[in-house]
Structures are given as structure tokens and as C-alpha cells.
């Protein structure tokens, strides 16, 4: 069953203890990732388009899909009129699939939490789903994402409930606000990231304006 295979793959990425181990887990999952996450009712790559469309006028860019995986978000945003979308991911195998979707203007391999290969203020906005979660990108990855987003641009991303406090996200949010790097715009309630499976898996979407 796809759900059983998907749950096993989820376990492998949630227990990865280094970026290398995480990349290897996603390399093993890449070929079946789309069908297996669909079997769980994974909503986030498609739902994030609603927040992007709410805060970024159609056609504005460039946008960055931070942790784009197989590129599920790109086609939805392209359909909504966004043409200039870049993607980054730590998995070369996932990026190859993302490239096949014909929705991204550029794709780069990089790890959130380390330096990113774009200049200050390059992007109109970045968006990210399913990346700030268990054993994945650290809260500190937000510093670089904010750096490469222009003033007046937007940071739009989800955070998993299990890492929000323990992963230091509240502290990073407060530091960025205190240092006048961003200001809060919108915060969703906690909601399920899988429509079918994992009913206890909750996320919250945050929107900040970079200042």
C-alpha cells in the first residue's frame, strides 16, 4: 500500500540526524515521493499558493521555493500567473524531478542553515512548506532566507508543531523582529498537513514582511 510505504519513508526522513543522512533518505524516496505523499493527503505544497497569492501580486517575482523537493508547488503558482520561480533543495534527485515540471526558472542544490547562493535582497518573496519540521531545516535557516529577500518582500512558510518551541523558532522570530529585519503580517491556526493520514501532525503558516 502506498500509505504504508509513505509512512516508512516519513520515518526515514524524520529520523535522519545529519543533512547527509537526510539527503540520502530523500534520494531513496524521490522516485515515489509524489504518489506516496498524495496517498497521505499531503496538502502543504498546494496550499502554500493561497498565502503567496494573498500577499504577492500575480506576476511579481522572483520567488524562491525554499526546500522545493520534487517541485509540487511550482506548477500551482505558475497556473496562478507567477513566472519567475527559483527552487532550492538539498537533494539532487528531488531537484531533477522538480526540473521536469517546467515551472522553475532556476534550481540550485543548497542546504538551509548554511549560506545560500543568491545576493542580498534578490527575491520578492520566499515560501516554504514541510521544511521546518522534525530533523529538517533549523530555525537558523531563516536568517539567510531573510537576507536574500528584498525589503518590502515576504517570508511565507510553515512550521511543524513539534519543533516550534523545541527548535527555537519563537526565539528566531523574536530576534528578527527585534533587529528590525521583519515584521509579522499573518499567522494561521494550527492545521493538519495530511488530509488522510497522520491526524496529529499539525503545522502553522507564518507570513512576515521583510523590512
Image (spheres, helix red, strand yellow):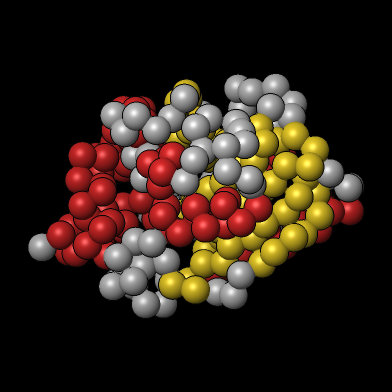
Side of 95 where 205 appears, left or right:
right
**Residue 91 seen:** no
Q: Quadrant of residue 3?
A: bottom left
Q: Residue at x 57, y 37 (%)?
A: 59
The image quadrant where one finds the C terminus is top right
Q: Is residue 193 visible?
A: yes
Q: Is residue 99 above or below residue 124?
A: above
**Quadrant assignment for the N terminus:** bottom left
Q: Is 29 on the left or on the right of 49, as rendered?
A: left
Residue at the left extreme of this rendering: 1
| Residue drawn at the location 81% of the way across and 55% of the way down | 183
| Residue found at x 43% / y 30% | 104
Left or right? Give the position of 42 relative to 167: left
Q: How many marks?
A: 0
Q: Is residue 6 left or right of residue 141?
A: left
**Residue drawn 58% across the image and 62% down it:** 205
Vertical placement of residue 107 versus 75, above or below: above
Q: Which of the two residues, 112 or 74, is positioned nearer the viewer here?
A: 74
- x and y percentages locating residue 32 in the rendered image: 20, 45
Q: Is residue 123 above or below residue 206?
A: above
Where is residue 46? Give x, y as percent: 41, 55
Q: Residue furthest right?
A: 179
| Image coords of residue 12 (percent x, y) | 31, 52
Closest to the observer: 92 or 84? 84
Amino acid at each position: 500500500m502506498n500509505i504504508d510505504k509513505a509512512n516508512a519513508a516519513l520515518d526515514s526522513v524524520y529520523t535522519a540526524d545529519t543533512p547527509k543522512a537526510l539527503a540520502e533518505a530523500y534520494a531513496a524516496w524521490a522516485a515515489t515521493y509524489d504518489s506516496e505523499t498524495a496517498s497521505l493527503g499531503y496538502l502543504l505544497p498546494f496550499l502554500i499558493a493561497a498565502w503567496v497569492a494573498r500577499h504577492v501580486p500575480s506576476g511579481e517575482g522572483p520567488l524562491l521555493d525554499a526546500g522545493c523537493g520534487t517541485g509540487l508547488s511550482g506548477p500551482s503558482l505558475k497556473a496562478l500567473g507567477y513566472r519567475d520561480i527559483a527552487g532550492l533543495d538539498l537533494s539532487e534527485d528531488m531537484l531533477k524531478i522538480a526540473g521536469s515540471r517546467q515551472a522553475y526558472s532556476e534550481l540550485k542544490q543548497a542546504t538551509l542553515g548554511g549560506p545560500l547562493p543568491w545576493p542580498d535582497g534578490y527575491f520578492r518573496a520566499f515560501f516554504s512548506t514541510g521544511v521546518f519540521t522534525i530533523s529538517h531545516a533549523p530555525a537558523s535557516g531563516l536568517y539567510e532566507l531573510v537576507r536574500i529577500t528584498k525589503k518590502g518582500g515576504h517570508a511565507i512558510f510553515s512550521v511543524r508543531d513539534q519543533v516550534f518551541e523545541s527548535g527555537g523558532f519563537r526565539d528566531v522570530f523574536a530576534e528578527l523582529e527585534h533587529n528590525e529585519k521583519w515584521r509579522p503580517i499573518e499567522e494561521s491556526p494550527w492545521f493538519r498537513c495530511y488530509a488522510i493520514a497522520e491526524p496529529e501532525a499539525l503545522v502553522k503558516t507564518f507570513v512576515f514582511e521583510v523590512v
